[in-house]
Image: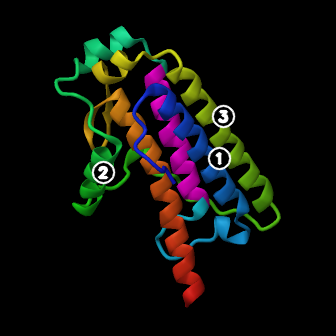
Amino acid sequence: MIQSDPRTRTEILQALGHVQAEVASYFGSLGGEFNQRTGDAWTPAEHLKHLVTSVNAVARGLAAPKLLLRLRLGRARAPSRSYAQVRDTYRAALAAGGRASGAFVPPPEVVSSDDAGQRRAEILARWDRANARLRDALEGWSEAQLDGIRLPHPLLGRLTTREMLFFTLYHNQHHVAAVQRRLAGEAAR
C-alpha cells in the first residue's frame, strides 16, 4: 500500500514500481483460486487482466504526442488534486454505481487446472510489460506537463495526467483488496 501521498514525478515513479511489485507478488502467490469463479464475480485472473488493460491504456496515453493530447482534450483548468482526493472521487463514483465497461471488462475465461500455472505466468508477464511501458513513458514528462495536460478516464472524465497516475496507483491496490476480501469471505464459509 502507498504509505504517503506521492506528489512529484519521481515519487510517482517509485510508487508505481512498488505497487507493481505488490500486485505481482499477491497474484503470483495465488494457487488454484487464481482462475476460480464464484457466481458472477470476476476471478482473480480477470482482475489482473483488467489491471493490465488499464495500465496499458494509461501507458498509451502517456506515449501519445503531448500536443495532440492538449489539442484533443484541452488544457487543465484547475490544479491537480491530491492522491487522496482522486481516490475519494473514484470511491464515490463506484458507490454511485460506476463500473468498468467496454474494453475494460475482461472476457470470461475457463482455464484447465493443467494450464493454470502457465496462464498465471503469462498474465503476470503482461503485467510487468505494461508497467514497464508506463514508467518508460512517464520519464518523458515534466512536472508542468503532468499538471497541464489531461487524459480521458471512462468513469471520472478528464483528469490531469498527474491525477490519472494517482488513479492508476489506487486502482491497482483497489483490485488487490477486492480479491483479498472475496477470497477471505470464501475461506470464512
Q: Residue sitting at 33 percent across and 50 percent down?
A: 87
Residue ID at (38%, 12%): 66
- In the shown orientation, is residue 123 left or right of residue 160? right
Amino acid at pointer 3: Arg
Q: Which residue is mark 2?
A: 90
Q: Is residue 189 magenta?
A: no
Mark 3 and mark 1 in contact? Answer it, CB < 8 Å: no
| Prevailing secondary structure of the magenta residues | helix
Which residue position holds label 3? 129
Q: Is 134 left, or right, of 126 in this rendering?
A: left
Q: Say whether residue 31 is left or right of residue 97.
A: right
Who comes first in sequence, dot 2 or dot 1? Answer: 1
Three-letter amino acid code at the position of disc 2? Tyr
Residue in the image at 59% along x and 35% along y: 131
Crowding near the residue tagged with mark 1, few <14, some 14–19, many ≥20 C-alpha atoms within 10 Å: some
Instruction: Choose mark 3 or mark 2, whichever is in front.
Output: 2
Q: Residue at x 26, y 63 (%)?
A: 95
Mark sitting on residue 150: none
State whether residue 176 is above or below residue 143. below
Residue farthest top in this picture: 67
Instruction: Assess whether residue 57 is covered by the magenta stretch.
Output: yes
Q: Quadrant of residue 167?
A: top left
